[in-house]
Image (spheres, helix red, strand yellow):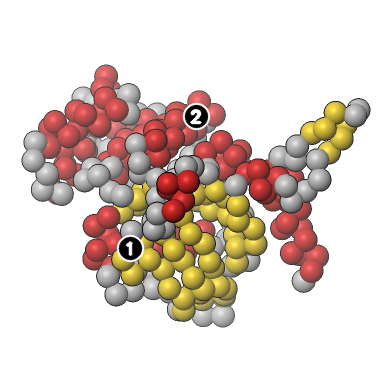
Amino acid sequence: MTDAIAERTPAIRVRGLQKSFKKLHVLRGVDFEVAPGSIFALLGSNGAGKTTVVKILSTLLRADAGTANVNGFDIATQSAEVRETISLTGQFAAVDEALSGRENLVLVARLRHLPAPGSVADDLLERFSLTEAGARKVTTYSGGMRRRLDIAMSLIGSPQLIVLDEPTTGLDPEARIAVWRTIKQLADGGTTVLLTTQYLDEAEQLADRIAILHEGRIIVNGTLAELRGLLPPAKVEYVEQQPTLEDVFLAVVGQRHGAE
């Protein structure tokens, strides 16, 4: 991530975000910022509160306390403006299996009132390496192809920010790598990406910055190098070995459990 990106107004700024469901405190004061044009990974175990953060930032859920700005708009008072500048891809591909891949894209382009929806669909099919499969029913697509189509649909209208909530859940290794390649291309093209995941290698491969959400709070936030610096390097047969993100995650989460 360049210095120019870092100096610009954050694409996302979150301060003191809290959310409870009856007696269950899901978010207990979450703070983080995401630089425009970067990939930010929100990492955490199941139930850590990742999807709740996503829903609040996407204006699908109201926070109990705290503030958040997305692309310069307040999520509480300017929700319509927020929705116009973002796109959300959930954990399961939201595609119509009765239609072909191209028909799905054309439908969304028409719903967004874009000119030449057929051209929009064809451009995205080519960009996501789906041209040959474009005329086929989505029921014939593999899991990785459906996910790529889902992300392609999310890009119609050129959103400034795309939110990917556990985008590779259930995919095989080859499909995961294909989706990773797509996500990197999005950021290279200037799109800001907020990625939630429970896969440590996914965050290692993709993210400019990584935040670990544990029991409703961000307990560490930094680049991969900064997170690795939290632990001393292991030495095996006099050869220095850098700690993996898995080592860092288990260490910081374990320290929190020990402190409680």
Could one spot residue 172 in this view of the protein? yes
* Outermost residue toward the top in this view: 132
The one of 48 and 252 positioned closer to us in this rendering: 252
Vertical placement of residue 239 versus 216, above or below: above
Q: Amino acid at mark 1?
A: Gly
Residue to which mark 1 is pinned:
72
Q: Amino acid at mark 2?
A: Ile
Residue drawn at x 22%, y 38% is 104
Residue 87 location in percent, x, y?
31, 51
Mark 1 secondary-structure assignment? loop
Mark 2 secondary-structure assignment? helix
Quarter of image, res 239 = top right
Q: In the rendered image, which quarter contains the C terminus?
A: bottom right
Residue to which mark 2 is pinned:
177
Q: Is residue 191 left or right of residue 116?
A: right
The one of 45 and 239 positioned closer to us in this rendering: 239
Residue 219 location in percent, x, y?
65, 62
Residue drawn at x 52%, y 62% is 32
Residue 125 location in percent, x, y?
26, 28
Residue drawn at x 17%, y 34% is 120
Q: Is residue 71 left or right of residue 112?
A: right
Number of numbered discs present? 2
The one of 197 and 77 positioned closer to us in this rendering: 77
Quarter of image, res 173 = top right
Q: Is residue 195 left or right of residue 238?
A: left
The one of 140 and 127 positioned closer to us in this rendering: 127
Q: Are marks 1 and 2 in contact (CB under 8 Å)?
A: no
Vertical placement of residue 177 versus 233, above or below: above
* Outermost residue toward the right in this view: 237
Residue 229 location in percent, x, y?
73, 47
Q: Residues within 10 Å of mark 2 (few under 14, many from 20)?
A: some
